[in-house]
Amino acid sequence: MNIKEMAHTSYAGLIITSLDEGDVTALTSDYLLNQLRTHGYLILRGFRHSIADFSERVRSTSSRISLDPARSFDGDTAQKVDAGYDKVGLHCENGNSPFWPDLCWFYCQKAPTQGSQTTVCDGKAVYEKMNAAQRAAFTSQDIVYSRRVDEKKWKTYALHALAGQPGAPTSIDDITLEHLYSVAQSDVGMRIDKLDDGAIRYSFQTPAIIGSRLNTKETHNFANSIFGPSNNYETPVITFADGNPIPDTLLAEMDDLCESLTFDVGWQQGDIVLIDNTRVMHGRRRIEDKDRTIFNALSYV
C-alpha cells in the first residue's frame, strides 16, 4: 500500500493519504493506534470507501462498539450524524456520562460543498495554554454532570452495549439497572437513581483535565463536555463537585481559548476520522449544506 503522512495542524492531527485508493481495512490496528497515541486524531483520506469498509475498520480496531439509541442506525456499527443544523459546541463524545468511549470515528459519505465542517480541538494544546488561575480552577475539584434519561433510551443502550457477550439479554424487556451498571466505566464517580416512571437520573463526576486512556504519557488534557450538545437528551446540569456552577467568566475564557485552537477537519469525500476521545474534543460549524452525509461510530480499544 502506498501512503503519505502529513501533519493536519501544528498542534495535533495526522493526515494519512492513500496514493493508490488502497483498502482502508488493510491498515493494521497497531499502526493506527500508535499514530493516534502520538497525534491525537487521524484523517484517513483517499482510500476506497463505503459504509461496509468503515464498519469493518471500526470493528477490527475495537474490542467493543457503543451505539447511541437516539440516533439512526446503519447496521451494527455506524450511525448517521443527524443532530440538527446548528453549531455544536466542543465536547468528548458521551463525555458527560459514565459511558465514555475511548475512540470516536467519523466517515464522510458525502462531503459538504460549503461550511458544515466538523471541528477538532486538542485538549493537550488547550491545557498547555491555560493560565495558572484557569488550571487551578479546574484541578482543585471535579465537575459533575446530572440528567434524566428515558427508560427506553437507557435500556436500549444497555442492550446494544452487551450484545455478543456470553449470557447477554436478548430483549429490552430483560434489561435491568444492573446491566446498565455493568457497561459503565468501573473507575468513575457515578450514581444512578431509578425514577417512578422507569427513567433514570444519573450524576457523573469526573475531572475536566484528564489523562488519555490511549497514551498514559499524556496526563493533562482539557477534554470534557462542558460546552457540548444535548440534541437527543435532556440538557445536563453541570456544576463543580461542591455544587456551585462553573462561573460564566471562566466558561467564556475557556471558550475563547478553545476556539483559538479549534480547526476544521476539511472534509473530502470518503474521509475517515479517528479521534482519541479522551484527549481531543470535537464539534461542528453550523450546517450550510444539508446534503452532507456523515456517519459516526464509538468504540473501546
Image (tube, rainbow, N blue to C red):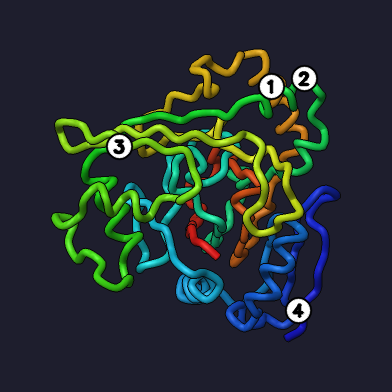
Ranked by sequence position, the earlier of labels 1 and 4 is 4
**Looking at the image, residue 225 lies above or below residue 122:** above
Q: From the image, which quarter does the C terminus lie in?
A: bottom right
Ranked by sequence position, the earlier of labels 2 and 3 is 2
Residue holding disc 3: 149
Q: Amino acid at mark 4?
A: Leu
Q: Are marks 2 and 1 in contact (CB under 8 Å)?
A: yes
Q: Amino acid at mark 2?
A: Ala
Q: Amino acid at mark 1?
A: Ala
Ranked by sequence position, the earlier of labels 4 and 3 is 4
- Single out the residue that lies furthest toward the bottom: 1
Q: Amino acid at mark 3?
A: Val
Residue holding disc 4: 19
* Disc ID at residue 137: 1
* Disc ID at residue 133: 2
Q: Secondary structure at mark 4?
A: loop
Q: Secondary structure at mark 3?
A: strand
Q: Position of residue 78 (x, y in %)?
A: 43, 63
Q: Are marks 3 and 1 in contact (CB under 8 Å)?
A: no
Q: Nearer the viewer, mark 1 or mark 4?
A: 1
Specify few, some or many for label 3: CA neighbours under 10 Å numbering under 14, 14-19, or 20 or more.
Answer: some
Q: In the depicted view, which residue is nearer to us: 283 or 191?
A: 191
Q: Is residue 88 visible?
A: no
